[in-house]
Amino acid sequence: MRARAAAVQLALVAAVLFVFWYFASNTAQNLEARKIASGFAFLSREAGFEIGEAPFLAYGAADSYARAILVGLINTFRVALVGIVLATVLGTLLGLARLSRNWLLAKLAAGYVELARNVPLLVQLFFIYAVITENFPGPRDALSPLPGVFLSNRGIAFPLLAPHAAYAWIGAALAAGAVLAWLLARWARRRQALTGQPFPVLSAGAALVLGLPLAVFLAAGAPLALDRPALQGFNFAGGAILTPEFATLLGGLTLYTAAFIAEIVRAGVQAVDRGQFEAAYSLGLPRRSTMRLVILPQALRVIIPPLTSQYLNLTKNSSLAVAIGYPDLVSIANTTMNQTGQAIEGIAIIMAVYLTISLSISALMNWYNRRIALKGARA
Amino acid sequence: MKAVHTVAAGAVAALFSGALYAQSTLDAVKSKGYVQCGVNTGLAGFSQPDSRGVWKGLDVDSCRAVAAAVFGDASKVRYTPLTAQQRFTALQSGEVDILSRNTTWTITRDTSLGLNFVGVTYYDGQGFMVPKKLNVKSARQLNGATICVQPGTTTELNLADYFRANRMSFKPVVIEKLEEVTNAYFSGRCDVFTTDVSGLVSTRGSRAPNPADHVILPEVISKEPLGPVVRHGDDRWFDVVKWSVFAMLEAEEMGLSSKNIDQNLNSANPAIQRFVGATGDFGKMLALDNRWSYNIIKQVGNYGESFEANLTPLGFERGINNLWTKGGLMYAPPVR
């Protein structure tokens, strides 16, 4: 029996490999017959096109296609990471609001969820983009709600702290504070286990994390020089600018995904049996500890797996950037394909990158899921 | 997303198609009964459906000429609207038989994309359009500007070249669909819209809320010879499309038009006799009916007629697109 099963599986693997081989060789043959260039040599050639947003990695038209695609990848990461954080925060708040005893709040949250998750994301993106570009004035008549902040159809220009030598030390102090807080929490846990004496870890930790950098900041003479944006020629120079394309994509992804996350959070909290609250109260646990120690750990077990899917969806949906002109990975890869004519290689790059990102998010979330799963339960 | 869809479809077609390409495009077109023509999604004067949904324009007429030559019926064309990014994959994968979509002839496209350009139907160059209220008089004043441009075009590359050569910087806003990118320009998201001058004139004439508010700057920064494209390696089809385009130019030079060609059927002029198929075997040489060129002129018209019907109303001048005999660049090899 076992030998036969193994033989069947072996034959299946061979068949799959054969199909792959057939497609690969047939493709190569067809490309050759039609004299279409193939291979990845184009990646090192000069790209020749400019990219609107290239933060963290300097890019110019003289750089290679590989670097252009890397810029696209960074742009995808940027919007996906910020989007995941914002969607999680907003989704959690909305989910809890739907459970609220306040009738108006609960109904408003319910209405939002139904609206946001039932309108296609692409439509939402076009809508937000049109609202920004059609309603805001040009840069020369920009609105200035706060000094140094300018709202226009070029985006939101806002001041940044001008670089100062002390900022590196403040960063170091922040890191030191975080490490000390972590050590403190470990010590407090061990002491409570041994003696039963609780220690105010939260407030002491916060004091460490915030207090140390603040002390360094004050010691350095509170350097607060601002690099303010100013109109120069056609656009704002100085400070930083949040472009309408980035804002649209981030807003669209956040608002859309938050609606799904809200439902997941609501389901997670409702999945915890009422008896768990009552049992915790009857043990004398205060309300906050009940939430933190009893309810949330159980709710998270229900929440994490579907939440992972939402994070993956958000990341993949970021490829809708093409429609509104945000230079994400797909947009840059599309341009590359079109300039070089090498569609198969371009699609292969897009697929490989999204697969890698998605599998990484999955692996991370699965690791977290195992950590919070019931010990001894099947994962 | 449609771009990705078409590109992916093209990639899949490349995976599967084996036998399909053994057959010549001319035979395939004859047996299916129509020409599948890739056109712009909507560029007034070149390819755009009119109020009754009939495709009109200079690029459309190239495809109609091929249909007239092959079938004796210019209406046997089906159109596939393509964005700049979709167009080459659509042609490579066999989704369209001809790509007639204001496409610039360059060495990269002619070689590594596996395509052949049949000729030039419009000599163009890249320009810049700005709102009049910005008071810009020259492209040299555009340092720091935000510029709307379509991706996957020679325009996008020329733009970067021009700013690099003049040590200026710019912020591109790159949107694929012509409609979306022109909306972004007209709403003020960009200071400048750049594309071929023909595209600027057409966009200003057909999409601007008030055309007088926009000026096209004097600088023309590139050569953009636009023309129909076919797949590499199918010489018979290449010949058919090439000579259909040339026939329209040749007819204008001979003074033949849709209005007078019937009167010239019995002309004593031997060149005209050959052209209308009364003598000679040019049709057979192309594996077509001997009245192929007569049908083109009768049903589509000569190049000048197409230009006047489609482009003149939008404010285009013949300029360098006039015949070589009238000081332009339009020159067809002799039909003999």
Image: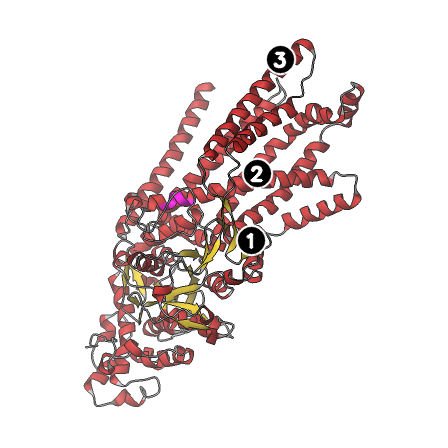
Q: Residue A190 got which mark?
A: 3
Q: How many marks?
A: 3
Q: Amino acid at mark 2?
A: Val
Identify the residue at horizontal 59%, vertical 18% (top origin).
A184
Labels 3 and 2 in the same subunit: yes
- Residue A69 painted magenta: yes
Q: Amino acid at mark 1?
A: Leu
Measured Cα–Cα span from mark 1 to mark 2: 19 Å
Residue furthest top in the image: A194
Give the x, y percent position of residue B254.
25, 84
Q: Residue A85 got which mark?
A: 2
Q: Are marks 1 and 2 in contact (CB under 8 Å)?
A: no
What secondary structure prevails in the magenta region? helix
Identify the residue at horizontal 41%, vertical 55% (top origin).
B171
Question: Which sits in the foreground, A194 or A332?
Answer: A194
Q: Amino acid at mark 3?
A: Arg
Q: Which residue is mark 1?
A: A125
Does residue B333 show up?
yes
Quarter of the image where the C terminus of chain B is located = bottom left
User: Can you say whether A108 is above or below B136 in the image?
Assistant: above
Label 2 Cα crowd, 10 Å radius (few <14 / some 14-19 / many 20+) = few
Labels 1 and 3 in the same subunit: yes
Label 3 Cα crowd, 10 Å radius (few <14 / some 14-19 / many 20+) = few
Q: Residue A263 got which mark?
A: none
- Residue A268 painted magenta: no
Secondary structure under badge 3? helix
- Write the start and end of the magenta stretch as one range: A68-72
